[in-house]
Amino acid sequence: MQKLVLASNNAGKVREFRALLAPLDFDIIPQGELGIPSAEEPHHTFVENALAKARHASAASGMPALADDSGICAHALNGEPGVYSARYAGENGDDAANNRKLITALTNYDDRGAHYVCALVMVQSAHDPEPLIVQTRWHGQIVDHAKGDNGFGYDPYFFLPELGKTAAQLDPAQKNLISHRGQALRELIVQLKSRA
């Protein structure tokens, strides 16, 4: 079983990555279990932040690392909150505060279209010259009232018209089939297999 450091301590992400990568025989180790602090995320794009996080985790652990940078982009807000999704309401904000800020920001807009983005980067070492990079989108709409108890982040407000449910109303297996992160991991797995 190959050890792989996950450059995240987000419990929801850890669960999703472990479930999605289980068939590939990876032993996913969250960076916090190794005492690795979170990397800085100073960049304006998901890909650059994911690459910085993967290189940081690999340098600190000496092992291959996987990082994602993901967030939600509201069309009426020119892509906000984007890379600032996790800290949209401020550094000490939580999911509830972030969602309140987003709903408030969209109050006067008819366009409620939004999409989740996941940029996924895997490096074999901190200086890997050929990182595997995948970026995917999951389209939906922002609704004013939370529905569902599954998921995390903006999931209770991210409505999927084709299913008539929010992301938080999906069971984890269904979400992993269609989510931005699920799409990205499947694409990454294709790249991993083509390199073997």
Image (tube, helix red, strand yellow):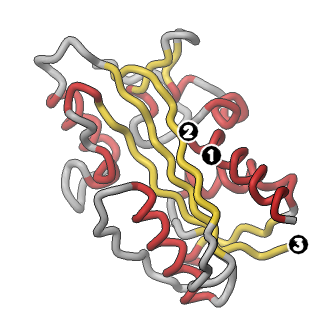
Marks 1 and 3, the one that precedes in the sequence:
3
> What residue do we see at 64% from left, 83% from top?
125
Badge 2: how crowded within 10 Å, few (<14), some, or many (20+)? many
Q: In the figure, is residue 112 to the left or right of 127?
A: left
Where is residue 43 shown, x and y percent of the image? 31, 65
The residue that label 2 is drawn on is: 180
How many angstroms separate mark 1 from mark 2 (CA)? 6 Å
Disc number at residue 184?
1
Query: What's the residue type where badge 1 is placed?
Result: Ala
How many angstroms separate mark 2 from mark 3 (CA)? 26 Å
84 vs 103, nearest the viewer: 84
Q: In the figure, is residue 138 to the left or right of 2?
A: left
Query: What's the residue type where badge 3 is placed?
Result: Met
- Cβ atoms under marks 1 and 2 closer than 8 Å: yes
Quadrant of the image containing the C terminus: bottom right
158 vs 77, nearest the viewer: 77
Residue 165 vertical placement versus 149 (above, below): above
Label 3 sits on a secondary structure element that is: loop
Badge 1: how crowded within 10 Å, few (<14), some, or many (20+)? many
- Residue lying at the far left of the rendered structure: 108
Badge 3: how crowded within 10 Å, few (<14), some, or many (20+)? few
Where is residue 137 shown, x and y percent of the image? 50, 36
> What residue do we see at 52% from left, 66% from top?
8
66 vs 34, nearest the viewer: 66
